[in-house]
């Protein structure tokens, strides 16, 4: 019994050390943008492509790599993902120009995109009891890496300039690789008839890129060209996949399995609210409240810190009661949290703002674990990788939507009134999240639908 418990613990640690690299690298780069502008002679818009291309590559890569891990083997793909990150992290500091640096970041994003769906597939197969607690531990790792990414990046920047933010990956890479090599079960041989629908992959990738570019364009104007192209590619992709015997994504399954479709939609909405706060609050605090970066970082710990505390408790609750009660708690605290933001004024102190943000941190702790367990309740085990990939793509869509919302509201002026408008938008979206939570089946019905 003790050996089984120890194996489970180390299996979760192995996956966690790999999966934390995506949020870590997507958040660390933010503090290095100013230095990179000096190094390569860039404008802020130019340097922001390091963030945008990372999200684009991750959004496309997650479901593609998830499907490949289901077909070709999860251990094999997990190790390949770690190697891709290692190669890109080793070469990025020697980039001769900005284009090469973007290329290495894209390779890094594709490598990290393998780790979450492959890791989730292994955990779901090997950990059959107290699965939600295991997911809660993983959520703690990813939340901490995202929350402390800017602080770690700032420290590494002082220690060894911008190349150091790539070198910091290697302790995590080495630890995860050695543990995965030893602990992960050997992959079964791929089925002789198993094929990858590469045309479907290409059409899906083109559709996602089109939609993300359209969403990014909303900050300035509605780009009808991007919209029409994205619609055309999406329709083409859907009709093509419906005719395939072995599609890359079972489009017809979205209709037959509406519960799974609503999970993706709900996760998009949750991330719109979360990232509107995660990126919008620091901007507001520094521009309007005139907080320095250190004070802003401490205030923002309310969002990540309370989530870290709540996540393991939520995992235990879900193992006993199912995901719906935790999602109801997450929806209620999200609505309350967005309303509390309306109490923040021009002269609010950091501790008061910290207290107002804490409710959204608690909401994040409920929602992340509950949404993941809901996903797997409506997904067959053999499709875990592909479903996990689409789940993370939903997260990136929510992130891009949030940046579009902030771009529209903060485009000309950043005031407390504009910040309150972001909060009210979050409240309206929160009502939609609550409605989707009410319609979700309870645990007994989930088992019948699985």
Image (spheres, rainbow, N blue to C red):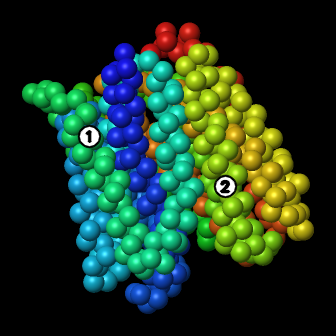
Q: Residue at x 85, y 56 (%)?
A: 352
Q: CA distance from mark 2 to mark 1?
A: 31 Å
SS assignment at label 1: helix
Asked which quadrant contains residue 293, the reply is bottom right
Q: Residue at x 43, y 50 (%)?
A: 20
| Picture layout, residue 45 above or below residue 69 | below
Q: Position of residue 398 (x, y in %)?
A: 56, 50
Q: Residue at x 60, y 61 (%)?
A: 403
Nearer-N-terminus badge (2/1):
1
SS assignment at label 2: helix
Q: Position of residue 259 (x, y in %)?
A: 53, 24
Residue 17 appears in the picture as rendered: yes
Q: Position of residue 177 (x, y in %)?
A: 26, 47
Q: Position of residue 434 (x, y in %)?
A: 71, 32
| Picture layout, residue 375 above or below residue 294 | above
Asked which quadrant contains residue 200, the reply is top left
Left or right: 270 in relation to 173: right
Q: 10 Å neighbourhood of mark 2: few (<14), some, or many (≥20)? A: some
Q: Which mark is residue 180?
A: 1
Asked if the residue under mark 1 is in contact with the one under mark 2, i.e. CB atoms within 8 Å, the reply is no
Q: Which mark is residue 125?
A: none
Left or right: 344 in relation to 141: right
Q: Residue at x 45, y 46 (%)?
A: 393
Choose between 133 and 221: the one closer to the eye: 133
The quarter of the image holding the C terminus is top left
Residue corresponding to mark 2: 301
Residue 225 appears in the picture as rendered: no
Asked which quadrant contains residue 336, the reply is top right
Choose between 68 and 11: the one closer to the eye: 11
Q: Residue furthest left?
A: 192
Choose between 54 and 258: the one closer to the eye: 54
């Amino acid at each position: 019994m003790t050996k089984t418990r120890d194996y489970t613990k180390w299996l979760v640690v192995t996956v966690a050390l790999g999966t934390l690299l995506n949020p870590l690298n997507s958040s660390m780069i933010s503090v290095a943008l100013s230095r990179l502008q000096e190094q390569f002679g860039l404008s802020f818009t130019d340097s922001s492509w390091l963030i945008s291309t990372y999200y684009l590559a991750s959004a496309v890569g997650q479901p593609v790599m998830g499907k490949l891990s289901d077909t070709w083997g999860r251990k094999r793909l997990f190790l390949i993902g770690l190697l891709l990150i290692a190669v890109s992290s080793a070469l990025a500091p020697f980039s001769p120009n900005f284009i090469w640096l973007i290329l290495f970041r894209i390779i890094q994003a594709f490598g990290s995109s393998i780790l979450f769906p492959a890791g989730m597939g292994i955990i779901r197969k090997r950990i059959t009891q107290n699965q939600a607690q295991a997911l809660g531990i993983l959520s703690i790792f990813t939340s901490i890496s995202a929350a402390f990414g800017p602080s770690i990046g700032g420290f590494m920047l002082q220690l060894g300039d911008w190349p150091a933010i790539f070198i910091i990956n290697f302790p995590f890479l080495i630890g995860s690789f050695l543990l995965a090599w030893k602990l992960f079960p050997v992959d079964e041989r791929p089925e002789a008839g198993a094929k990858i629908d590469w045309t479907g992959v290409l059409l899906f990738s083109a559709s996602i890129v089109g939609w993300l570019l359209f969403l990014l364009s909303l900050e300035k104007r509605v780009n009808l060209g991007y919209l029409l192209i994205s619609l055309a590619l999406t329709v083409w992709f859907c009709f093509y996949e419906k005719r395939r015997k072995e599609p890359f994504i079972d489009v017809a399954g979205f209709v037959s399995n509406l519960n799974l479709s609503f999970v993706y939609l709900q996760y998009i909405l949750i991330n719109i609210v979360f990232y509107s706060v995660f990126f919008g609050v620091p901007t507001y605090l520094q521009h309007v409240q005139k907080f320095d970066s250190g004070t802003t970082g401490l205030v923002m710990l309310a969002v990540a810190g309370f989530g870290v505390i709540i996540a393991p408790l939520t995992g235990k609750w879900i193992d006993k009661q199912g995901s719906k009660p935790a999602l109801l708690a997450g929806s209620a605290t999200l609505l309350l949290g967005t309303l509390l933001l309306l109490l923040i004024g021009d002269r609010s102190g950091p501790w008061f703002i910290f207290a107002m943000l804490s409710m959204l941190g608690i909401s994040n702790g409920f929602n992340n674990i509950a949404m993941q367990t809901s996903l797997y309740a409506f997904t067959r085990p053999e499709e875990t990788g592909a479903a996990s990939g689409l789940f993370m793509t939903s997260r990136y869509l929510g992130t891009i939507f949030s940046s579009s919302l902030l771009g529209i509201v903060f485009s000309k002026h950043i005031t407390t009134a504009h910040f309150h408008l972001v909060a009210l938008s979050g409240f309206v979206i929160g009502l939609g999240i609550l409605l989707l939570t009410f319609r979700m089946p309870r645990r007994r019905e989930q088992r019948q639908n699985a």
